[in-house]
Image (cartoon, rainbow, N blue to C red):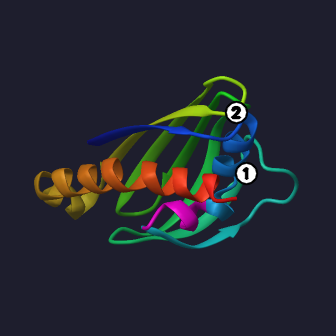
Amino acid sequence: MIRAAWQVRIERPQQQVFDYVANLDNEPEWNPDASNVVRKSDGPVGLGTVWEEDFARVGHYVTTISVYEPPRELEFDARNPKADARVRFHFAAAGEAATDVSCAVELTLKGFMRLFEPVMKGVARRGIETSRAPRLKSALERT
């Protein structure tokens, strides 16, 4: 299993940050590996909302909100034939107009992909830990 984590303070209110991250339609704005995000569920974003998306180097995912506790906890369960991912966010108010965001990622490689785990571990962890936080901060603070 590959684990990575990051944290960032965003100068926006907690509910606004939660809502933005919970809606995966926004993900390509802050996650350089995500593309072709298509929502497959009707109704408001919440527990059980499903998207399909393409992810660089790993392929097509079906991603579901598995924990939805606004404005504090959010978790995505992403599955594909090569790797499953669990991405958990925690949002904490930092005063009235800022939010501390922490994210923990667990990536479980499957099948032949498991052979590449030792090589991918460092690359994946570095990519997740260095790019996501500043891009999320930039995306939210420029609006």
Q: Residues within 10 Å of mark 2 (few under 14, many from 20)?
A: few
Relative side of 130 to 119, left or right:
right
Mark drawn on residue 105: none
How would you classify the magenta stretch by its main secondary structure? helix
5 in magenta: no
Image coords of residue 52 (percent x, y): 61, 67
- N-terminal of the pair, mark 1 or mark 2, is 1
Going by the image, does 69 lie left or right of 61?
Answer: right
Which one is nearer the viewer's eye here, 13 or 24? 13
Q: CA distance from mark 1 to mark 2?
A: 28 Å
Q: Secondary structure at mark 1?
A: loop
Residue 95 in the image: x percent, y percent? 66, 23
Amino acid type indicated by mark 1: Thr
Vertical side of 114 occupied by 16: above or below: above
Q: Secondary structure at mark 2?
A: loop
Using the rendered view, name the quadrant where residue 43 is placed: bottom right
Residue 98 in percent (x, y) is at 63, 33
Which residue, given by chain and number where applicable, does mark 1 sit on?
49
The residue furthest right is: 43
Q: Nearer the viewer, mark 1 or mark 2?
A: 2
Count of numbered marks: 2
List x then y, in percent, for residue 4. Answer: 31, 41
Quadrant of image for the N terminus: top left
Q: Answer above or below: position of 117 versus 25.
A: above
- For the record, the magenta segment spans 27-32
- Mark 2 — residue? 97
Kindly check if marks 1 and 2 are in contact, taking CB atoms under 8 A apart as contact.
no
